[in-house]
Image (cartoon, rainbow, N blue to C red):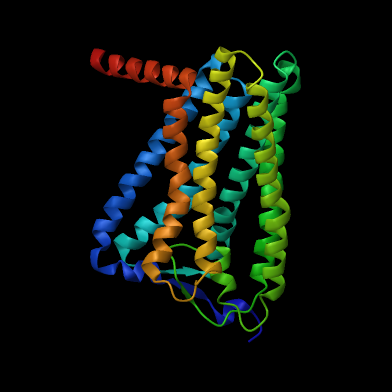
Amino acid sequence: MENVTELSPSFVFLGLLEMERFRFLYAIVAFIFYFITLFLGCLIVYVIWIEASLHEPMYIFICTLIINGIVGNTVVFPQFIIGLLTGSSTICFYKCLVQVFCVQSFPTVEIFTFTAMAYDRYLAVGYPLRYATLMTNGKALKYIAIIWISAYILVGILVTMTANLKFCGVNINNIFCENMSLVRLACGNSAMVLNVFGLVETLIFVFGAIFIIIYCYTRTLLICLKVSKASCFKAIHTLSTHIITCSIFLAAALFVILRYRLNGGTISISVHVLLSITGLLTSAIVNPIVYGIRTEALKLKILQNVQMLIFWKGVF
């Protein structure tokens, strides 16, 4: 067999087969959750876009998180819902690779954005008089561009290596394609280099990002203890919001990773699917809710825009 497409022209989602009995019910539930995340995310992005008072680095980073969550869910949920409704549980190899690229890019962009946000809050609290020059909107946009480009390059290398593997199986214990699912289907030791590369990449970039996040937030909290109570309370309130969302994302990502690293061969397909969906859905639904509720300026603008929308609907 000369290439992977001859050996494995398509993959089968065992997660979809597992849901066959109640597939219409699952499709309705999935659509509701997807619609909620899409609505909340688009609402926050829209408010940040039209409100000039929110055109600040912190809100630009929040907007990036929300958009990334929308993209991550849109890559998976529409196809998942269509698969449930039509009863189709297969995907061709190249479409699977595209989905792998998008799914792997989502957490990479997420962790890098949280790193930029931690650095931004450190500058805001540690250098309040110089913050306006140290972190401008232009610099924030440059950081965001670097985040997306670097994430796409790193994931692109990983997906390219995966595309060159030879596969001896077609059954994926999930409802969507992800890199580790394909690696586990590779023949013999052909995936060893990819596993080593993935491990090194995780240690250098992911744990490096986590170290920077912890360092920035620790330094920021120490600075808060030296300022006035009012300033300290305001800074800690903002920091706690970022720490909550970042911690929830890392916890969800950890569960997704561990399901393969620890006892991955024996846990049920249902558990695989549940952990995968949780990893994708958590950030996309938690970020809009937490930032929308706990960020006062953003919450106020959201309420004003919603009230205005209701008013205009009442008029017409």
Name which quarter of the figure residue 53 lies in: top right
The relative height of residue 284 versus residue 55 in the rendered view (above or below) is: below
Give how far across and how far down residue 145 sits, in percent.
69, 37
> In which quadrant of the rendered image does the C terminus lie?
top left
| 296 or 140, nearer to the observer | 296
Name which quarter of the figure residue 128 lies in: top right
Give how far across and how far down residue 199 sits, in percent.
68, 63
In the image, 134: left or right of 225? right
| 3 or 101, nearer to the observer | 101
Give how far across and how far down residue 37 sits, in percent.
40, 40
The relative height of residue 147 versus residue 275 in the rendered view (above or below) is: above
**Can you see residue 88?**
no
> In which quadrant of the rendered image does the N terminus lie?
bottom right
Q: Residue at x 25, y 59 (%)?
A: 24
Q: Residue at x 35, y 56 (%)?
A: 81
The relative height of residue 314 versus residue 292 in the rendered view (above or below) is: above
Q: Residue at x 53, y 68 (%)?
A: 260
Tell how many labels.
0
**Can you see residue 240?**
yes
Give how far across and how far down residue 194 sits, in percent.
69, 69
